[in-house]
Amino acid sequence: MLRGERTSRRVSRPANASVRATYASDGSMNNLLVMKFGGTSMGSAERIRVAAKICAGQKTRRPVVAVVSAMSKVTDLLLNTLRHAEAGDRPGIEANIELLAGRHLETCDELLEGERRRQATSGIRALIADFGRIAHGMLMLGERPPRSVDEAIAIGERLSALLIAEYLESTGIPARAINGSDVIVTDAVFGNATPIMAETRKKADQVLKPLLSVGIIPVVTGFNGATVDGRQTTLGRGGSDFSASILAAVLDASELYIWTDVDGIMSADPRSVADARVLDAVTYSEAAELAYNGAKVLHPRTLAPLIERQIPIWSKNSFHLEHPGTRITSTVETPPGPRAVTSMADVALISLEPASLAVSSARLMARALEALADANAEVLAFTSSSYRQSFCFLVRKEELSSAMKCLESDLALELTHGYLKPIEVDENVGLLAVVGEGMHGTPGLAGRIFSAISEQQVNIIAIAQGSSELTISIVVHRDGLERAIQAVHKECR
Ligand code: ADP
Ligand code: ASP
Ligand code: MG
């Protein structure tokens, strides 16, 4: 355990505590705000100062829990280092560790002075040494065990939590860096763990509430957790949003702010559509559909813990504080028609077709879905053709090999006896999704969308629409994906 990273239950009252948590008669905390700062919002000393100022401003009015990501690109750097380790590339490891140390130590020098800087520097060095030990262990083994990967990559968040907690303290705002693995309890699916909410609630009560009660801001690392028996896990790439929503739910927060680098949820990713607009408000369902269909602005699993408790979320820009951002709640006055377009490029289409009409396609579908569940692969879209009885699933490329392995082994009998044609995979595809509560019952909309795509000479491979009519998912050739998004965005404006 390092300086600035404590979980002690005995917490002394800071001299200059501002707002302390108070509790309602049912024991729930009044007016708690959870705020998550993403990688760009933590990306430099200047950004950390802004994030700290936001915390300090809110703290004058209500108790605050901060959840932080690693500094931008740090998780990629850590993962890249572990790949070097697996490949036996010692110089690659050393070069990356130097970059990692340089970035954090320079930021520390810019933020802190004197004894506090000295202490924080040794904390940073100790964390980087821990990372180095895990990387060198992998070098010796020549492999990357998922459990050790999770322990190693959470160090990015531990470094940034340490930096901002120390900086807050240096400005007179009581703060404490907390390792998310001391609070968020998960299952043992390394790399994509799922929280166990009841256990997490108990831990949050033990670790975070005593700090809040005396006016200290807990700065919790996003992205990571630990199993009941203490093995470290992570929640999937971009998972700090999810960490923040888990904590907001178990602490019964009154609001969650997600601070990022755009003005809120937009009608499309501004990186692919130049005239994308910020949406004032979207429903939980719209936000979830957008996130699940590739809008990186929110991690797909962020919404679920909040919906049950009706905790409102705001997506806000830490580079543009005057902008109110996008409010996400259960009911929003949605205009008719689509709200936003989103896409996923790294996907693959798996097609299955019975070899004869005598084979029950329903049974094959059921077995194929079971195989995908065994592979832990998510079905992003599913379509079927009733005449040929063929059907296809869209999955993430990173889940393709495990999906294929499970499909081929679970359906081995059907494949060898010729009941099922060889399974086909098309990796040259992309998913485009059009989302909006107001699409329900809007006549002619699908036709307009398909025409807009066809006018770009982009071939539509598959189409899926849920019965809620909240989302139309369209699989197109990968090469035409960008053109299709722009055309559909223009058509739906
Ligand atoms: P953070 O590091 O703060 O978590 P991310 O990079 O994960 O930020 O998410 C923010 C990015 O999401 C934006 O820079 C933007 O390019 C992208 N994005 C994709 N789709 C959307 C959308 N519909 N609205 C806003 N941003 C989007
Ligand atoms: N640092 C992690 C990642 O890059 C988690 C996050 O930023 O949300 O995936
Ligand atoms: Mg993110």
Image (cartoon, rainbow, N blue to C red):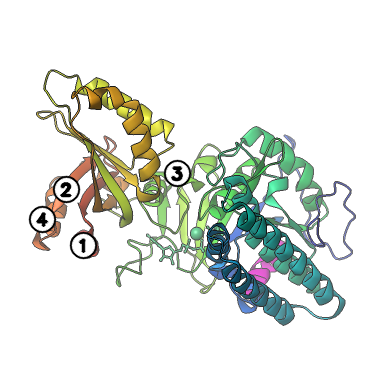
Q: Mark 1: which amino acid? A: Asp
Q: Relative to residue 60, is residue 446 drawn left or right?
A: left
Query: Which numbered mark, 1 or 3, is in the foreground of this view?
Result: 1
Residue 46: name its quadrant.
bottom right
Identity of the residue drawn at 77% across and 52% down: 212
Give the x, y percent position of residue 211: 80, 52
Instruction: Name the residue beneath numbered marker 2.
Output: 461
Local secondary structure at mark 4 = helix
> Regarding mark 1 in the picture, which secondary structure is present there?
helix
Give the amino acid at mark 3.
Ser
Q: Which residue is mark 3?
A: 330
Q: Indicate left or right for 9 with 186 as reference.
A: right
Of mark 1 and mark 2, the one earlier in the sequence is 2
Write down the residue under mark 1.
Answer: 479
Q: Which residue is mark 4?
A: 451
Q: Is mark 2 within 8 Å of ligand 1?
A: no
**Residue at point 31%, 56% (across, down):** 343
Residue at mark 2 to residue at mark 3: CA–CA distance: 33 Å
- Is tag 4's residue or tag 3's residue first in the polypeptide sequence? 3
Residue 121 in percent (x, y) is at: 78, 73
